[in-house]
Amino acid sequence: MRRVERGAALLIALGGLALIGALAAAALTLTTGPATRAAAAVERATAERAAEAAIHRLALAFTLPAERNRAPRDGTVIETNFEGAALVISAQDALGLINVNLSDAPTLSRLLVHSGADPADADELAETWVTTREGLGRNGFATLSAAAALARPELQDVVETTLDHATIWSGAPGVDPTVATAPALAAATNVPLDVAQAFVARRTLDGPRTPLPPEVNARTLRRSDGRVARVSVRVETPGGGRASLSVVMERTTSPRRPIIFHAWR
C-alpha cells in the first residue's frame, strides 16, 4: 500500500508542476504579448515618420534645379538609408504616364491591354472612362480611384496595374519618351509593348538621349518640364517596422508655396 500511495503522490506532484508550468507560460504570454505589440506599434510609427520625412526631403530637392536635374524621373528605383532605416524611393514624371482625362479611348484601351486586360474588356472600359469623364465637366476624374471604381470586380487587379502607368496630373495626352514607362509609351505611340520595353531597357543604360524606335509616332510625344512627379517611398526600420507613402508633387513658381502635394496615399 505504501508503494501505491507513494506512486499516487508522485503523480499528483507531477500534475501540480505541470499545472504551475502552464499557468506560468500563460502569464508570460499575457505580459509579453502587449509589450510585443507595443514594440511593433513603435517600429511602425517610426517607419511612418521616416517615410514622411523622406517625402519632405525629396520635396525640398524637387525645388533645387541641380538636385532635380540629377535625380531620375523615369520610375527608377533607388535604395538607400535614411535616419537609420532602409529606404526605397522612386520618382515618376507625370508626362511619363497616360493621362486618363485627356487620352482618347484607343490609347486607354491599349494601356489596359498592355496591363493584361482582354481586348474586348479593355475597349468597353476605355469607352466607359471617356463617356464618364465627359459628364464630369472640364476637369474629368478628380482621382484615379474614381476611374478604377468604374471597372467590374473581376477587372480590378488589371485596372490597378494599369493605373500604375496613368495619371490625371500631366496636363497633356501624350508622353515624354525620356521618362515614360514602357506600357505608357506603347499605348501613347501605338507600338508593340516589347518594342517599348526594349527601348526603356536601353534608355536605362544609355540615358535620355537613347534613339527612339523607328515605329514610334512622334506626333504623340511631348517634352516634360519636370513640373509634376509621383514620388513613392517604402521604409523598413531595423526593428522591422514598415511603411509606404506615395504622393504627387507639383512644383510652382510661388516662393511662398514652391511645392503642392496632391493625392497622398
Image (tube, grey):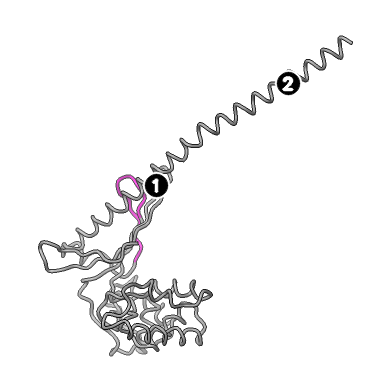
Q: How many circles with numbers are drawn on the protein?
A: 2
Above or below, comparing residue 5 to residue 263 in the picture: above
Residue 150, given in percent of the width and then of the height, sits at 43, 78
- Contact flag, marks 2 and 1 (Cβ < 8 Å): no
- N-terminal of the two: label 2 or label 1? 2
Q: Secondary structure at mark 2?
A: helix
Measuring from the top left, give residue 201's x and y in whole percent: 38, 73
Q: Quadrant of the N terminus?
A: top right
Q: Which residues are magenta?
A: 76-87
The residue wearing badge 2 is: 14
Above or below, 251 relative to 186: above
Q: Residue 247: image x %, image y %?
A: 30, 63
Quarter of image, res 56: bottom left
Q: Residue furthest left?
A: 255
Farthest top residue in view: 2
Asked if residue 138 lies in the magenta stretch, the reply is no
Q: Measured along the vertical axis of the image, is residue 31 above or below residue 66?
A: above
Residue 257 place in picture, x, y as percent: 14, 62
Judged from the image, the secondary structure of the residue bearing numbered disc 1 is helix
Magenta segment, prevailing SS (helix, strand or loop): strand
The quadrant the C terminus occupies is bottom left
Q: Residues within 10 Å of mark 2 (few under 14, many from 20)?
A: few
Residue at 73 percent across and 23 percent down: it is: 15
User: Label for residue 27?
Assistant: none
Indicate the quadrant where residue 148 lies. bottom left
Q: Which residue is mark 1?
A: 44
Q: Residues within 10 Å of mark 1 (few under 14, many from 20)?
A: many
Looking at the picture, which amino acid does disc 2 mark?
Leu
Is 213 or 92 nearer to us in this picture?
Answer: 92
Observer-nearest of 185 and 39: 39
Q: Is residue 164 left or right of residue 4?
A: left
